[in-house]
Image (cartoon, rainbow, N blue to C red):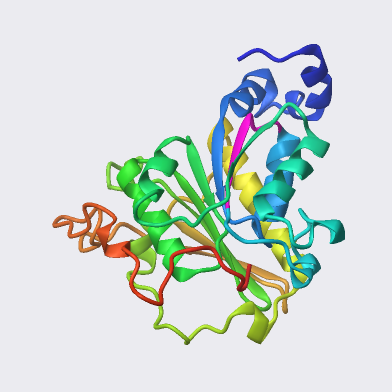
Amino acid sequence: MSLTPEEVERYARHIVLRDVGGPGQQKLKAARVLVVGAGGLGSPLILYLAAAGVGTIGVVDDDEVSLSNLQRQVLHATPDVGRPKTQSAAQAVERINPNVSVEAHPFRLDAENALELISSYDLVADGSDSFATRYLVADACALARRPLVTASLGTFDGAITTIRSHEAAPDGAPNPTWRCLFPEAPPPGTVPACAEAGVLGALAGLMGSMMAIEVIREIVGFGEGLVGRLLVVDALSMRFETLSYAWDPENPITGTAPTITDLSIHASRPGRSAAPREGAA
């Protein structure tokens, strides 16, 4: 996919990078990335993917902008309060880079639509703040054979990793899945939501920007990615640590005896939802 003269000038600082160059920028232009959640993590992620020239950005979020979002969700502004986040996101991307196409999905991600939606993109970046959504997205990516960049936020901490569970490591061993790292979600109520515990706004910017770096690296193909590595950030001590994890043959989706072969395990139950909702993100 060729670049126009205007795009060559716009992305000049990428093009002169030895590890990106013209071919890498063309890969970015041709890429289709689905962002789950246009909140604290999704905001800087979407902004930097748009600035980087990712050709198509899908945004799935059924929420509206609220005043309490603005402390960290820099994709949105005060006049956007009350608007659908997907609508606000599309307008922000248009302002930054009109060469980028935004596909808005203003609905809940669930067991019925996740696999079809995810299959229509090259890569998924999950910035949701719901454990139900996180496991739904990870399982759907494994079944759809799509790479996943996923991050999370706490009050003063964050974590990020990349999942390519449909591929093998250089030594031939299967790559790990999300369930190899975290087999099950914590019981409901054990992890306080953002409204209860709070979150450092600038930390969302840091983690969302790191997601953008990882997505760009996955598309272009340079550097050492985070497959099999969980990068943990402690903003209180400003400490970064990397933890390694490996494929678990007993994991239920890509293990030796899989028990998850579709998304029926995520089917909604009364009073429960797999939608991205206001929380740490």
Q: Quadrant of the C terminus?
A: bottom right
Q: What segment is highlighted magenta in the picture?
A: 53-60
Q: Residue furthest left?
A: 257
Quadrant in which residue 79 is drawn: bottom right
Q: Residue at x 46, y 55 (%)?
A: 109
User: Residue 179 at what x, y percent from top left?
Assistant: 34, 63
Seen in the picture, residue 179 relative to 102 is either above or below; the reply is: below
Q: Residue at x 70, y 76 (%)?
A: 199
Q: Is residue 156 left or right of residue 177?
A: right
Of residues 39 and 176, the one nearer the viewer is 39
User: Residue 1 at what x, y percent from top left?
Assistant: 60, 15
Q: Is residue 55 magenta?
A: yes
Q: Main secondary structure of the magenta part?
A: strand
Residue 21 in sight here: yes
Total marks placed: 0
User: Residue 169 at what x, y percent from top left?
Assistant: 35, 43
Q: Residue at x 40, y 62 (%)?
A: 135
Q: Is residue 184 magenta?
A: no
Quadrant in which residue 185 is drawn: bottom left
User: Residue 56 at what x, y percent from top left?
Assistant: 61, 32
Of residues 206 and 56, the one nearer the viewer is 56
Seen in the picture, residue 201 relative to 195 is either above or below; the reply is: above
Residue 175 in sight here: no
Quadrant in which residue 128 is drawn: bottom right
Q: Is residue 275 left or right of residue 91?
A: left
